[in-house]
Image (tube, helix red, strand yellow):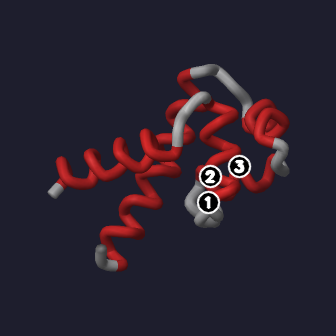
Amino acid sequence: MNRKTATAICAEVAKLLKEERLRQNLSLNAVAIRAGLAYQMISYVEREMRIPRLDTLLRIGDALGLSTGELIGRAEQAISKSK
């Protein structure tokens, strides 16, 4: 996988996390509490200011009821559709 594709997938994962949080009508703070992370980290990830480490991504996904595999798969599908 090239760097451009990896960057696009990371951006799509951030978008999907935010969409899911909003779909569930959860605040950034509610997700942060569920994930055991700082509010700022959730915000940074959603705004693509930080690429989360795997453990952080697992915690955010779990807080939203999403598996990391599902998130990455959905992101890859969205990227391939946009090509």
Q: Residue at x 69, y 55 (%)?
A: 56
Q: How many marks?
A: 3
Q: Which of 25 and 66 lies nearest the eye of the viewer? A: 66
Residue 68 x, y percent position in the rendering: 51, 45
Query: Hey, what amino acid is under mark 3?
Result: Ile
Q: What element does badge 1 sit on?
A: helix
Q: Is residue 55 above or below residue 68?
A: below
Tell me what residue is drawn at x 60 percent, y 40 percent: 61
Marks 2 and 1: in contact by CB < 8 Å?
yes
Report x, y in % for residue 1. 30, 73
Q: Earlier in the sequence, mark 3 or mark 2?
A: 3
Q: Is residue 26 left or right of residue 19?
A: right
- The answer to whether marks 1 and 3 mark residues whose Cβ atoms lie closer than 8 Å is no
Q: Residues within 10 Å of mark 2 (few under 14, many from 20)?
A: many
Question: Is 62 on the left-hand or right-hand side of 15?
Answer: right
Label number found at residue 57? 2
User: In the image, residue 6 lies at what x, y percent?
Assistant: 38, 69
Image coordinates of residue 62 in percent, x first then y, are 65, 36
Asked if residue 55 lies left or right of residue 74, the reply is right
Label 1 and label 3: CA atoms lie apart by 14 Å
Residue at disc 3, secondary structure:
helix
Identity of the residue drawn at 47% across and 41% down = 16
User: Which of 62/9 is in front?
Assistant: 62
The relative height of residue 73 versus residue 54 in the rendered view (above or below) is: above
In the drawing, what numbered circle is on residue 63? Answer: none
Residue with the mark numbered 1: 54
Residue type for callout 1: Leu
Residue 42: mark: 3
Please identify, in this view, whether the residue under mark 3 or under mark 2 is nearer the observer: 2
